[in-house]
Image: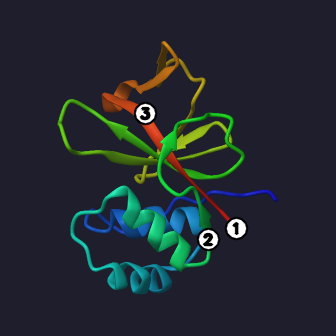
Amino acid sequence: MKYEIEVVNYGPDLHNHSAISSLTGLCFEETDQAVKKVNRTCWGGQTYVKLFQNLGFNTNPRFIKFDPATPYPCIMRCSNHVKGYWYLFIYHDGVVYDLYGNSFRLDDKIHVYKRNGSYFLKHYGMKVTSMLQVWI
């Protein structure tokens, strides 16, 4: 199956909505209903797993080590120097998307630095740590 990513941005307070709609293709209303059922202000990895599964999508049972060869769209979890926080990007078919409409290829040396098997997003100051694959 061929997947296409269309990144949507619903605004600064709706990052979860934006990520879910971008990965699933669901409209805002469907995504909003699913997010309201979760009723969380702080989202952990299992929150995404349960939400996608409740919407009828398949996922890994948890976030797994990032694999750039994944055939599925995924949430790419990244971290910086702030302990206890992580940031999400969308990844599919060699392209990294932020939720503001920017994208770049993972092999683009202007945007990505690879060292000892780990990937670093230069302009964001972040290290890619793991991913959650999402598929039909």
- Residue 51: x and y, percent? 46, 73
Asked if residue 83 lies left or right of residue 65, the reply is left
Mark-to-mark CA distance, 2 and 3: 23 Å
Q: Which residue in the protein does label 2 denote?
A: 57
User: How many numbered discs sit on the rendered protein?
Assistant: 3
Q: Which residue is mark 3?
A: 128
Q: Position of residue 11 (x, y in %)?
A: 32, 66
Three-letter amino acid code of the residue under disc 3: Val
* Image point (38%, 56%), residue name: 45
| Residue 97 sits above or below residue 55 on the image | above
Is residue 87 shown above or below 106?
below
Q: In terms of secondary structure, where does tag 2 sit?
A: loop
Q: Nearer the viewer, residue 133 or 91?
A: 133
Labels 2 and 1 touching (C-beta < 8 A): yes
Tell me the residue at 21%/69% (across/down): 41
Q: Secondary structure at mark 3?
A: strand
Kind of residue at badge 1 = Ile
Residue 13: image location, x then y, percent = 25, 67
The answer to whether the residue labelled 3 contacts the one labelled 1, judged by CB atoms less than 8 Å apart, is no
Q: Earlier in the sequence, mark 2 or mark 1?
A: 2
Please indicate whether residue 32 sits to the left or right of residue 44 in the image: right
Above or below: residue 126 compared with residue 103: above
Left or right of 1, for residue 89: left
Q: CA distance from mark 2 to mark 1?
A: 5 Å
| The image quarter in which residue 4 lies | bottom right
Residue 34 drawn at (x, y percent):
43, 82
Residues packed near mark 3 inside 10 Å, few (<14), some (14 to 19) or many (20 plus): many
State the residue lying farthest toward the front: 61
Residue indicated by mark 1 = 136
Residue occupying the far top of the picture: 116
Q: Name which quarter of the figure residue 86 lies in.
A: top left
